[in-house]
Image (cartoon, grey):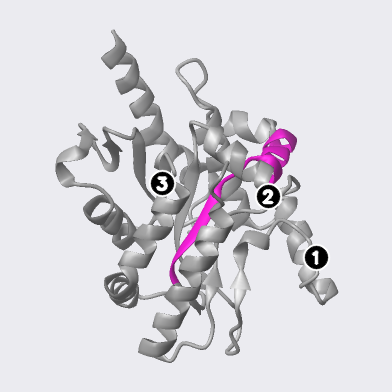
């Protein structure tokens, strides 16, 4: 590959951060995108572009505990780096790799289901957890992207009003980031993000809705799927998050695909 996602995103982030600091006096910024893993980054990017299922999780903002916030690159969530200064940081990353936090585990199950489900195997929740070790290995080696809509770090809750304002102010940057990543599956964590995605990313006339599944859109010319999802930190059980959410709609899309081929 001649292009570099990492380089293009870092150029974008510099511009984005500069505008945020000028407008909002923002002191900290979250970087994100294609997650780093055990593969060399160039190989990881090649693997991403060669895959027909490029999953992007579009989340709200980075939840940082306490009053003091900091710059964070969430692309590093699964790997140890020279920036890890404490034993606590290393333990958090080890927990992420082991899918210990429910938030991470929910993402891992969705990544597996969207990547593996097809007309021959619907991959119900009970079947997924039987393959936990394989899911864990997959999550640590399969390229996928996490993007925070609001780059200013936050806390445990983010009001819809504040998120919508951020999308109004900086949505053009977010669109550019998604274009750089070029996903084929976009999982939107919540209503405001889903509304933004289906109204701003593609022309309305190019989006198809499958009857009874308003929580999913298909962009016809690129084959990109956009899903409404509960947030992975939602109090729903992991079973409900998986089987009653995105994967429920994805199974319907697979049925729709099958009908179209007949």
Q: Which x, y percent locates residue 248?
A: 40, 34
Earlier in the chain: of badge 3 and badge 2, it is: 2
Alpha-carbon span between mark 1 and mark 3: 29 Å
Q: Name the front one of labels 3 and 2.
A: 2
Mark 1 crowdedness (10 Å alpha carbons): few <14, some 14-19, many ≥20 = few
Q: Position of residue 3 (x, y in %)?
A: 53, 48
Q: Residues in magenta? A: 132-150
> Which x, y percent locates residue 100?
71, 54
Return the residue nearer the eye: 20 or 74. Answer: 20
N-terminal of the pair, mark 2 or mark 1, is 2
Q: Nearer the viewer, residue 57 or 221?
A: 221
Identify which residue, 135 or 35, lies in the foreground.
Answer: 35
Which numbered disc covers residue 63?
A: none
Q: Which residue is mark 1?
A: 91
* Residue picked out by circle 3: 186
Q: Which residue is mark 2?
A: 41
Task: State which quarter of the image contains the C terminus.
Answer: top left
Callout 3 secondary element:
strand
143 within the magenta span: yes
Residue 146 image position (x, y, % from top left): 52, 56
What crowding class fits label 2: few (fewer than 14 Cα within 10 Å), some (14-19), or many (20 or more)? some
Kindly identify the residue that appears in the image at 43 percent across and 92 percent down: 25
**Vertical relation: 235 (above or below) 187:** below
Above or below 114: residue 5: below
Q: Return the residue found at the far right.
A: 87
Disc 3 to disc 2, C-alpha distance: 22 Å
Residue 19 seen anywhere in this rendered image of the structure: yes
In the picture, measured across the screen, residue 145 lies left or right of residue 134, that is left
């Amino acid at each position: 590959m001649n292009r570099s996602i990492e380089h293009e995103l870092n150029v974008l982030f510099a511009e984005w951060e500069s505008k945020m600091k000028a407008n909002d006096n923002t002191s900290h910024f979250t970087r994100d995108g294609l997650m780093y893993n055990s593969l060399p980054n160039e190989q990881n990017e090649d693997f991403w572009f060669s895959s027909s299922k490029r999953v992007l999780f579009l989340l709200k903002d980075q939840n940082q505990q306490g009053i003091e916030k900091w710059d964070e690159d969430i692309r590093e969530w699964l790997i140890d780096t020279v920036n890890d200064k404490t034993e606590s940081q290393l333990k958090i990353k080890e927990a992420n790799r082991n899918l210990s936090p429910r938030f991470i585990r929910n993402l891992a199950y969705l990544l597996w289901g969207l990547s593996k489900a097809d007309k021959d195997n619907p991959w119900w929740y009970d079947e997924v957890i039987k393959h936990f070790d394989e899911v864990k290995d997959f999550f640590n080696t399969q390229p996928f992207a996490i993007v925070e809509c609001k780059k200013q770090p936050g806390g445990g809750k983010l009001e819809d009003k504040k998120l919508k304002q951020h999308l109004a102010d900086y949505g053009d940057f977010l669109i550019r980031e998604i274009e750089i990543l070029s996903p084929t599956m976009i999982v939107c964590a919540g209503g405001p993000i889903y509304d933004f995605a289906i109204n701003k990313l593609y022309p309305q006339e190019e989006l198809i809705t499958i009857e009874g599944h308003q929580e999913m859109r298909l962009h016809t010319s690129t084959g990109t799927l956009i899903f409404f999802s509960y947030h992975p930190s939602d109090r729903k059980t992991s079973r409900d998050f998986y089987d009653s959410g995105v994967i429920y709609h994805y199974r319907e899309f697979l049925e729709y695909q099958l009908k179209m081929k007949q």
